[in-house]
Image (spheres, rainbow, N blue to C red):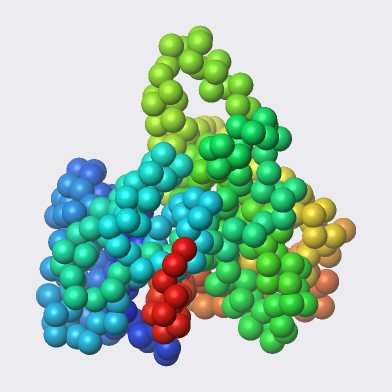
Amino acid sequence: MLVLNSGSSSVKFQLLEPDSGRSLAEGIVERIGEEASSASLTAGPQALERDDRVADHEAALQMVSSLLDDAGIRLAELDLMAVGHRVVHGGPDLYRPTVVDDALIARLRELSPLAPLHNPPAILGIEVARKAHPDVPHVAVFDTAFFHDLPAAAATYAIDRELAERYDIRRYGFHGTSHQYVSEQAAAFLDVPTASLRQIVLHLGNGASASAIVGGRPVETSMGLTPMEGLVMGTRSGDLDPGIITYLWRAAGMSVEDIESMLNRRSGVRGLGGEVDFRVLHRRIASGDAAAQLAYDVYIHRLRKYIGAYLAVLGGADVITFTAGVGENDATVRRDALSGLGAFGIEVDEHLNESPAAGARRISPDGAPTTVLVIPTDEELAIARACAAVLGDGDGDG
């Protein structure tokens, strides 16, 4: 199974066996459209890197094929089961893994205004991959699927009901593939059934989201109609007073497109501190950079607010899990996000938290009422298994 995860400025890819989870090759093309792009691939002992500029997503997918060829892996010679595609927004009616056809692509185009940074590159990735591999099925797996059945009180916005129904306005939630995978892995790590757990999952990457999960089913999530709501992110604002939008329109003379671009691309940690890489942000904080410090403080403050809210929703948490790039690798963020919560049974062991160990691990002290975990997400494996399941049972409808 070849899995493509076409994001707003990157394409992650992995060639793997769904049943065993064995990866034949994986890699990423990053900083698409920027002056200094990069690409890398790992296949067993081989590690390949390219620094060629990648102009757009079509060029990125061509780079993926070139890297695989250089590693001696020719997709045309493999018994490829399918190509799986991560699609961010499935709207109200696409929530199961779905075999791609022209009608599905047309529907995804209609949904693009809901995820303007993500759905268009995903569509492009699907189109290019279908041309390259016309003889195998292509399957779309939706980020919103896990949250499709959120309780009505969590999914509903308090706006005019008829307007919301006419335009399908609700909280959809995103990073669902990751939240579902990580919550299941947390239960497996603890060797307890998911049905017995109250979980908070914190997916902290360039995009960031939180979820509250009871018995394996989500009851709250931070992202909403679009992936812009919720936590402070790398370039996205997260929660803000909607009055800011109309104020900027009136007072600053900004168009709707200008405001949307600013909130998606020039906000969040970058908008406040001029940087999205937390490693660089920490170095700037250490050097006394006040803007970097404020960006970090706002990020942590918002994260703690959501953790507190979800503790109230759940009535306490049995396990809190950090995942994704920042969540898995930034011990300082993990420490600061949970500091001072001992009264709620939440503690972080300093030594365990600072350990550079990879893989799933516990970072809370022995006997703590709430177990704190770090679990690497594997959205590509989850997508591959979802694709294999839908092809196996023959049900490809959304």
For the N terminus, the quadrant is bottom left
Name the spot of residue 110 as percent of width and height, x first.
38, 44
Q: Residue at x 42, y 71 (%)?
A: 396
Q: Between residues 224 and 159, which one lies in front from this camera angle?
A: 159
Residue 105 picture quarter: bottom left
Question: Relative to 364, is 35 above or below?
Answer: above
Question: Relative to 201, is 182 above or below?
Answer: below
Q: Residue at x 64, y 59 (%)?
A: 149
Q: Residue at x 47, y 63 (%)?
A: 398
Check the image and name the residue furthest to the right.
Answer: 343
Name the spot of residue 225 as percent of width and height, x first.
55, 43
Residue 315 picture quarter: bottom right
Inspect this view and state whether residue 397 appears.
yes
Q: Residue at x 20, y 48 (%)?
A: 56
Q: Is residue 231 left or right of residue 274?
A: right
Name the spot of residue 293 as percent of width and height, x first.
56, 38
Q: Is residue 16 left or right of residue 329?
A: left
Inspect this view and state whether residue 371 appears.
no
Q: Between residues 179 and 321, which one lies in front from this camera angle?
A: 179
Check the image and name the residue furthest to the bottom.
Answer: 20
Q: Is residue 28 left or right of residue 302?
A: left
Question: Relative to 284, is 121 above or below?
Answer: below
Name the spot of residue 202 as percent of width and height, x first.
61, 59
Q: Count the marks: how many?
A: 0
